[in-house]
Amino acid sequence: QVQLVESGGGLVQPGGSLRLSCAASGGIFRFYLMGWYRQAPGKQRELVATVTSGGSTNYPNSVKGRFTISRDNDKNTVYLQMSSLKPEDTAVYFCSAIRAGSTELYWGQGTQVTVSS
């Protein structure tokens, strides 16, 4: 059983930056594909970024060039650095983990990010 705990959310002005963290426990972190998703009120959860065990990253066009996902396998932590934030980035951000070859997807409890002046 993998536990994920997000932190770092908050209120930020448009154009600002924020870094989210997700601390993992209960599994061999370096074997997991890690991801960040977000869900805005009334909308479906959407992918924000993923990073493989080898460090390869993937982003949708909506955040590409503004968000950066990274992982520290020694600290069992994945990060999401967000810059040039827009009001439409407002959402609850969730960390996810899935091990290669498995269908079991783990979620954190989420952290709120609000972009507003």
Image (tube, rainbow, N blue to C red):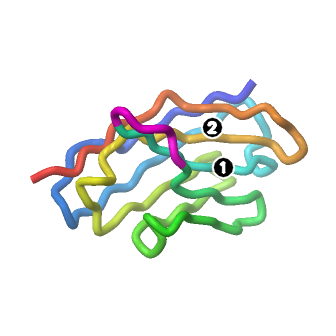
The foreground one among 56 and 5 is 56
Region in magenta:
41-46
Residue 14 included in the magenta stretch of the image = no
Task: Name the image quarter holding the N terminus.
Answer: top right
- According to the image, label 1 marks what residue? 34
Residue at the image position 70 percent from the left and 68 percent from the top: 56
Give the left or right position of residue 13, taking residue 84 as reference: left
Label for residue 117?
none
**Residue 24: x and y, percent?**
63, 37
| Spatial CA span between label 2 and label 1 | 10 Å
Give the left or right position of residue 60, taking residue 111 as reference: right
Mark before the other along the chain sequence, 2 or 1: 2
Residue at the image position 29 percent from the left and 53 percent from the top: 88
Asked if residue 111 is positioned above or below residue 89 in the image, the reply reads: above
- The local crowd at label 1, few if under 14, some if 14 to 19, many if 20 or more residues have their Cα within 10 Å, is many
Q: What element carries label 2?
A: strand
Amino acid at circle 1: Met
**Residue 51: x and y, percent?**
66, 59
- The local crowd at label 2, few if under 14, some if 14 to 19, many if 20 or more residues have their Cα within 10 Å, is many
Disc number lying in front (2 or 1) = 1
- According to the image, label 2 marks what residue? 24
The foreground one among 115 and 30 is 115
**Residue 98: x and y, percent?**
75, 41
Q: In which quarter of the image is residue 59?
A: bottom right
Q: Do the residues labelled 2 and 1 touch (CB within 8 Å)?
A: yes
The majority secondary structure of the magenta stretch comes to loop
